[in-house]
Amino acid sequence: MPPRRSHKKSKAGCQRCKNRKIKCDEVHPVCGNCHKHGVSCDFEGPLTPSENTPGTPGAPTPSFVRNDSTSHASSTSTPRSPSTALPFNQNPSQMVRANFNPASSRLLELKLMHHFTAITSQTFSDTPEQKLAWQLAIPSLAYDEQCLMDAILAVSALHLRALQPGDQALIRASHGYMASALAQYSLLLNRGVSAFNAEALFSTSALIAFQASASRRFDEDGGYTIPLAWFHSFQGVKTVVMASWQWLRTSDRIYPIINSQPALSLNLDPERKSFFAPLLEGMEEQLEALPESQRAETRQAYEHSVAFLNWSHQLPARNRILGFAATVSRRFVELLDQQDPRALVIASCFFALTKVVDDVWWLQGIAKKEVNGICSLLPSSWWPKMEWPLRIANHEGPMDEQTWGKSGESEASVKIEPWMACDVRDHIDLLAQIMNEQVPPD
């Protein structure tokens, strides 16, 4: 047998290449494999000044570089004063471009901001009030908060990428601006929520959630993975809302967005014969196998998520369906991370519900991708419970009632607890009060 040909192992390769077990060429700021597939590379990081001469010819679009000397900067750095707000193409992470060309950089950012206000902002909701808030109020907030400005530019770049998938400059811009937005958003959160940053933190968290959702359509490497980032990002929006509600509830700029969400009216009775009741079959036997300390929380996670599915299925509107990821409990997200079969089936039904809003750019193809992907992870014994989500996700053409399935009861016939029958402001007021009462004293 001839000796094996020796080769140099890539020990400093990016994490994506290591996970895929392929050789990384270690090219910075984006390795060849990540560049080829148009995905984020963890060589991209805190971005610092390039040594290239400004205004280099032949470099009409910006690219991003990493400086390892700043990649581990302490999060306890002295915060910048709001009065020292930096231009769009700079930030506290010293974000600049390789082959830096000030004119072309400004043109890109003007293009992205125009696209956001004219087009992208109109895709986040069906209601005129919410569309107007995203078009005018949110961009005006961004002039004083860099994390929000970068999040706006990142989402706009991702939207343009969906329309122009071959444009590498848009791929780099989307990744770079979002990396910067996340870094600054974390710093702002660490300083504490206040009346001065509540609006910007909420808006940034919502855009991060939109980005996490839309990015799934571009993630085609390797096998299927559960979209935990989708759930974590929407859970983050919920956390910010609860922490800053005392200021958001009186905000003229933010309240139209929150108020467009319908107040939950859930029937949590697991014995009711609702449309998705079969998803809870065998739950008690499953709970018996868990430690006693986990049973009540796990039961609540299942029942609450199924009740939300029933509520959305009765009237499948976008503002109802998309609340699922933010509404489910932390325990439910943990179960997803553990690839618990019941939680996976419930999540697949949620993604199947998004089929009715498949025409929205940041949700296109999500139902089919996620439902079929989740099915590939399930043991065969759970496949019968996947009949409805598979049928919906893979359906082509208009959705009729026979295909969608009839819930069997109207909202008027559902018994709702009195505390659940309120508008969204009263609902969040009550939740915030409950959460504050549960906070232990210092």
Image: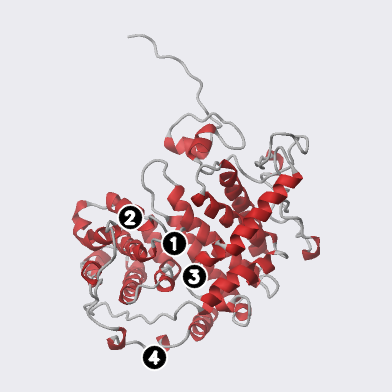
Q: Residue 354: which quarter of the image?
A: bottom left
Q: How crowded is mark 2: few (under 14 residues within 10 Å), some or many (20 or more)?
A: many
Q: Distance between the residues labelled 1 and 4?
A: 35 Å
Q: Distance between the residues labelled 4 and 2?
A: 37 Å
Q: Name the residue under label 1.
A: 360
**Picture layout, residue 16 above or below residue 239:** above
Relative to residue 94, is residue 193 depicted above or below?
below
Looking at the rendered structure, the kind of residue marked 1 is: Val
Per the model, the C-alpha gap separating discs 3 and 1 is: 10 Å
Relative to residue 85, is residue 418 drawn left or right? left
Q: Residue 288's image quarter?
A: bottom left
> Which residue is outermost to the bottom?
418
In the picture of the structure, the residue carrying the numbered disc 2 is 368
Dot 3, crowdedness within 10 Å: few (<14), some or many (≥20)?
A: some
Sequence-first disc among 1 and 4: 1
Q: Nearer the viewer, residue 378 or 120?
A: 120
Q: In the rendered image, which residue does mark 3 sit on?
A: 125
> Label 1, label 2: how many angstroms apart (C-alpha)?
14 Å
For the residue carrying disc 1, how many other residues have a C-alpha within 10 Å: few (<14), some (14-19), or many (20+)?
some
- Camera-side mark, 3 or 4: 3
State which mark lies toward you, 4 or 2: 2
Q: Of the residues under marks 3 and 1, which one precedes in the sequence?
A: 3
